[in-house]
Image: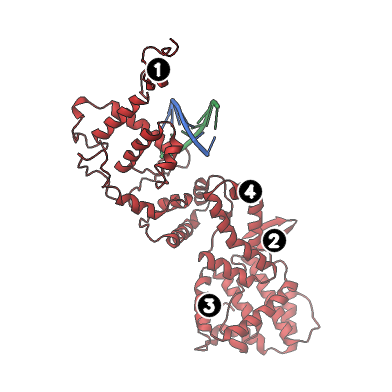
Chain colours: A red, B blue, C green
DNA sequence: CTTAGGG
DNA sequence: CCCTAAG
């Protein structure tokens, strides 16, 4: 049995390689009496059944079970102990053996798959392509087998589904909110659920076969079940997951990458952190990058005079590798640092001039509709910085493109406008706060009670 | 959720 | 940019 490798299983149809099939052939050639002995050796009891087919299946299943136990990784307590093998529900082995080899052979291969979980994907594809019309018979065989399995080994059935239900129950308190309130995240959760749900229902019918297909077809990779546990802050959970499951990081990363590729093939940077970040903010569409980089230059409302080469034409897709979140505890954060582009700054200034400083959510919704990564808090912060910069502007810098400082991205005209707006809206950083709103009304700065007089 | 402010 | 207190 150990002689067989799951990869070579696909070649059976074309080139008979019986070296690994000894187990099955042996079983097949055994007489009833011998089968009885094997049965006893397997189950520790005698049997009176004389059906050769039944005996073979039963023995095969017994062997399968024992193998399962040895490879068990999860133990879930649900009144009873439920053990799960490394690769559950791998019954979907469309062995190209045809009718020559009874169900027993299939079971053996299932076991082989159990130990070669990583190759399941490949085997499925290969067998699927090579299979041809043999598939029908094998499907029948495995189906028939599944029927017997249900009665024979209940221990094996509860598998990934249990974990899902557990984690689902754990995060049940959030599920409601996701659907109702959270807009973007909710959608993602719905889709992810829709991938899982049918699998569960189908597998309840005892057809783990389909469940395997479904789960694999959806993601193309086996996702750690921990993924189902989501909290209100997905990004942190992703990191927590990675931290908790460092070995699975690569898989998770590729999975995310794949997911992104499905949604867009435009994102070109390979930074894992970046990708994770993008995943956590689904509304971030690559088209936005494109549009932004396009309308980057033309905006000449304020900066007609400025030749600005620092408009960061490097693009937004390949920008930051600044993701520094190495230290586990209060270490460096700076998860993502997006440099403010000139167009963004100008949009912000425009928005402030239109809607007024302080109404950041409005500005974000109206003027920054396409810049999803800028939150209203970001706008506020940026405006604060702009204010600081604008009032720190030396008179010499006014009117000219002060290219003195390399670290001075904001052109002077814009800063002037910022200062203008700030003064207009009485957003002066330092001055007396008592005259704030009234000053904007055109009243005297010194006399707050002017209207009163 | 939105603002404001400190860090 | 992050975090959090306050509406």
CA gap between label 3 and label 4 equals 46 Å
Kindly state the secondary structure of the residue where label 3 is placed.
loop
Q: Which residue is mark 1?
A: A435
Tell me which numbered mark, 3 or 4, is placed earlier along the sequence.
3
Same chain under badges 2 and 3? The reply is: yes
Is mark 2 in CB contact (under 8 Å) with mark 4? Answer: no
For this view, does A331 lie left or right of residue A54?
A: left
Tell me which numbered mark, 2 or 3, is placed earlier along the sequence.
3
Same chain under badges 1 and 4? The reply is: yes
Report the disc number at residue A176: 4
Q: Which residue is mark 2?
A: A82
Same chain under badges 2 and 4? The reply is: yes
Crowd band around label 4 with a 10 angstrom C-alpha radius: few (<14), some (14–19), many (20+): few
Tell me which numbered mark, 1 or 3, is placed earlier along the sequence.
3
Is mark 1 in CB contact (under 8 Å) with mark 4? Answer: no
CA gap between label 1 and label 4 equals 47 Å
């Amino acid at each position: 049995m150990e002689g067989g490798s799951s990869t070579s299983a696909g070649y059976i149809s074309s080139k008979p390689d019986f070296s690994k099939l000894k187990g099955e052939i042996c079983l097949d050639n055994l007489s009833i009496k011998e089968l009885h002995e094997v049965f006893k050796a397997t189950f520790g009891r005698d049997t009176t059944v004389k059906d050769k087919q039944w005996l073979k299946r039963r023995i095969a299943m017994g062997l399968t079970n024992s193998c399962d136990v040895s490879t068990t990784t999860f133990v879930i307590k649900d009144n009873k102990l439920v053990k799960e093998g490394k690769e559950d529900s791998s019954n979907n082995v469309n062995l190209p053996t045809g009718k020559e080899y009874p169900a027993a052979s299939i079971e053996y291969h299932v076991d082989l798959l159990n130990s070669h979980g990583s190759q399941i994907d490949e085997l499925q594809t290969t067998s699927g392509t090579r299979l041809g019309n043999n598939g029908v018979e094998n499907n029948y065989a495995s189906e028939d087998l599944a029927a017997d399995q249900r009665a024979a080994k209940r221990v094996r059935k509860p598998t990934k589904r249990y974990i899902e239900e557990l984690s689902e129950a754990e995060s049940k308190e959030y599920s409601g909110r996701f659907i109702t309130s959270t807009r973007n995240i909710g959608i993602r959760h719905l889709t992810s659920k829709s991938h899982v749900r049918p699998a569960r229902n189908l597998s309840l019918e005892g057809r783990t076969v389909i469940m395997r297909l479904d789960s694999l077809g959806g993601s193309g990779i086996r996702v750690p079940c921990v993924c189902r546990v989501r909290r209100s802050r997905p990004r942190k959970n992703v990191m927590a997951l990675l931290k908790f499951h460092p070995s699975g990081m690569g898989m998770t990363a590729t999975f995310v990458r794949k997911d992104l590729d499905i949604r867009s093939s435009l994102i070109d940077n390979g930074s894992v952190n970046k990708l994770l970040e993008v995943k956590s903010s689904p509304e971030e569409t690559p088209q936005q990058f494109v549009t932004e980089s396009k309308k980057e230059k033309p905006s000449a409302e304020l900066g007609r005079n400025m030749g600005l080469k620092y408009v960061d034409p490097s693009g937004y897709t390949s920008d930051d590798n600044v993701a520094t979140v190495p230290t586990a505890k209060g270490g460096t954060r700076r998860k993502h640092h997006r440099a403010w582009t000139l167009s963004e700054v100008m949009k912000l200034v425009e928005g402030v001039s239109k809607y007024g400083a302080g109404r950041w959510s409005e500005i974000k919704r109206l003027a920054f509709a396409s810049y999803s990564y800028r939150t209203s808090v970001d706008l506020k912060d940026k405006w604060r910085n702009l204010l600081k910069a604008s009032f720190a502007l030396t008179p010499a810098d006014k009117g000219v493109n002060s290219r003195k400082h390399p670290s001075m991205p904001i052109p002077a005209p814009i800063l002037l406008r910022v200062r203008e707006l700030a003064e207009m809206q009485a957003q002066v950083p330092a001055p007396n706060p008592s005259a704030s709103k009234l000053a904007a009304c055109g009243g005297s700065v010194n006399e707050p009670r002017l209207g009163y007089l």
